[in-house]
């Protein structure tokens, strides 16, 4: 029995679930489509074509994640903060894939552990925001919520949510997935992932697998719920609880052991190895105190999770000139703190999750090779949302992870 079939059996035993079940739960961070009829029409079109990934590919990733949870592999997870339609090119995609592959090789060469490569690629077109509006030079506008929803252009008409963008996101994701599958033979597979944020879109891309007799989310191999949408009673967790993909949850510094255990029970009640990844985003100053009670609780309860460190999101600050940035020193400190806690408790530090660019950018401060000074940040600031690591900075993170794994 495949891991997908095992999950399906447990889900069928436990309760009835349908792709639209999330609609009975509070749904945060959803677009306010001004024309609901147009949105429904777009979603009907997305339901018709093939899914972006197959159930067999998702099951393959589940087996790899199970190896991570058992301490035999390591996840290298990275890519754009927010993919943009305009940035989709064969050159840009190749540069990101080349960087992720180099990072994986760095980890394996330094630690001996095979790497599982997961890209924030082919679907990371929607972003949660902390505010419904954002300041501009002349006032305020509706917040940019990713190219799937609206445009980053500082124009009121462009910031209006446009449901036709969901179809464009599907077409761009399909093109990127085709490019990933056409990579030369012998290169490691790169699995796709994104935050399952726009639930109508995710529902429309749910597909029924005849072999397993159950549903999987065909929008990506790995789907995750974010720090802002991980409410155990919310629609996002409800949706991910039913699809048979490997899934992940972002865990921030305010999460309690009880909340994390409940998430584990909802997302993986059958304790299927390879089903669940916990991505901690705690902050360099908080990881030493915040991570141990979570690790203890999950381990004592017998949940076979893969632990991954996101050292980016809780280490964001503003430069003196107002740019969002992140310090490489803080990022590396959180990575080292993550490994230290897992060494202390005898658990496996299973991966790193980074926002990175395939080309040289100056969005994050510091680094050993060609370090970026704070006054240099504006020179190569290209991100659509949050600051990303340059290739040199990302490789430095991989090297530190490899060194920590070999201790």
Image (cartoon, rainbow, N blue to C red):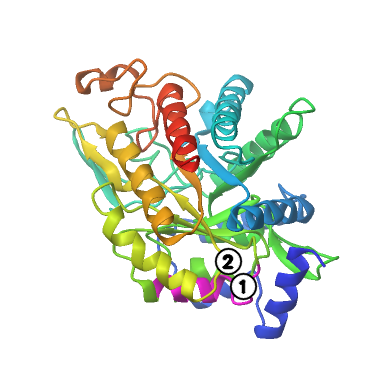
How far across and how far down the image is residue 171, in percent?
66, 39
Residue at figure coordinates x 63%, y 71% from the top left: 242
Q: Nearer the viewer, residue 33 or 191?
A: 191
Q: Earlier in the sequence, mark 2 or mark 1?
A: 1
Classify residue 244 by image quadrant. Answer: bottom right
Left or right of 223? Residue 339 is left
Left or right of 184? Residue 155 is left
The part of the chain drawn in magenta is 259-272
Would you place residue 258 above or below residue 246 in this image? below
Q: Nearer the viewer, residue 403 or 273?
A: 403
* Quarter of the image where the N terminus is located: bottom right
Q: Nearer the viewer, residue 257 or 360?
A: 257
Please give the label number shown on residue 271: 1
Dominant secondary structure of the residues highlighted in magenta in the image: helix
Res 302 seen here: yes
How far across and how far down the image is residue 271, in percent?
61, 72
Is residue 264 one of those drawn in magenta?
Answer: yes
Q: Are marks 2 and 1 in contact (CB under 8 Å)?
A: yes
Please give the label number shown on residue 17: none
Left or right of 330? Residue 91 is right
Res 82 seen here: no
Q: Check disc 2 and report its element: helix, strand or loop.
A: loop
Is residue 115 one of those drawn in magenta?
Answer: no
Instruction: Decide: few, some or many residues near mark 1? Use Cα within 10 Å; few <14, some 14-19, many ≥20.
Output: some
Residue that numbered label 2 is attached to: 304
How far across and how far down the image is residue 103, in percent?
54, 30
Residue at figure coordinates x 31%, y 32% from the top left: 328
In space, the residues marked 2 and 1 are separated at their CA atoms by 6 Å
How far across and how far down the image is residue 28, in percent?
40, 64
Residue at figure coordinates x 29%, y 55% from the top left: 288
Q: Check disc 1 and report its element: helix, strand or loop.
A: loop
Q: Residue furthest right?
A: 211
């Amino acid at each position: 029995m495949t891991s997908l079939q095992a999950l399906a059996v447990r889900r069928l035993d436990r309760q009835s679930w349908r792709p639209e079940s999330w609609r009975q739960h509070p749904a945060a961070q959803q677009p306010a489509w001004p024309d609901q009829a147009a949105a429904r029409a777009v979603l009907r079109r997305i339901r018709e074509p093939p899914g972006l990934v197959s159930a067999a590919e998702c099951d393959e990733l589940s087996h790899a994640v199970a190896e991570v949870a058992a301490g035999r592999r390591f996840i290298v997870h990275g890519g754009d903060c927010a993919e943009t339609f305009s940035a989709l090119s064969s050159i840009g995609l190749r540069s990101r894939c080349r960087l992720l592959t180099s990072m994986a090789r760095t980890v394996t060469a330094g630690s001996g552990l095979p790497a599982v490569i997961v890209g924030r690629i082919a679907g990371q077109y929607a972003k949660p925001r902390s505010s419904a509006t954002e300041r501009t030079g002349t006032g305020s506008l509706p917040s940019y919520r990713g190219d799937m929803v609206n445009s980053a252009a500082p124009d009121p008409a462009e910031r209006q949510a446009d449901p036709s963008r969901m179809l464009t996101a599907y077409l761009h994701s399909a093109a990127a997935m085709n490019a990933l599958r056409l990579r030369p033979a012998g290169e490691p597979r790169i699995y796709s992932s994104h935050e399952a944020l726009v639930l109508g879109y995710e529902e429309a891309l749910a597909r029924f697998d005849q072999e397993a007799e159950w549903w999987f989310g065909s929008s990506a191999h790995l789907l995750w719920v974010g720090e802002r949408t991980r409410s155990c009673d919310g629609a996002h967790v409800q949706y991910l609880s039913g699809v048979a993909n490997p899934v992940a949850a972002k865990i921030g510094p305010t999460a309690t052991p009880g909340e994390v255990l409940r998430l584990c029970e909802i997302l993986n009640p059958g304790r299927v190895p390879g089903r669940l990844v916990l991505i901690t985003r705690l902050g360099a100053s908080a990881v030493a105190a915040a991570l141990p009670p979570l690790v203890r609780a999950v381990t004592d309860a017998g949940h076979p999770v893969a632990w991954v460190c996101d050292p980016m999101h809780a280490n964001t600050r503003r430069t003196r000139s107002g740019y969002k940035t992140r310090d490489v020193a803080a990022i590396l400190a959180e990575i080292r703190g993550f490994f230290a806690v897992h060494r202390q408790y005898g658990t496996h530090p299973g991966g790193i999750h980074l926002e990175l660019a395939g080309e040289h950018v100056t969005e994050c401060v510091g680094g050993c090779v060609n370090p970026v000074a704070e006054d240099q940040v504006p020179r190569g600031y290209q991100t659509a949302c949050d600051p990303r690591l340059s290739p040199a900075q990302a490789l430095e993170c991989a090297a530190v992870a490899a060194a920590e794994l070999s201790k």
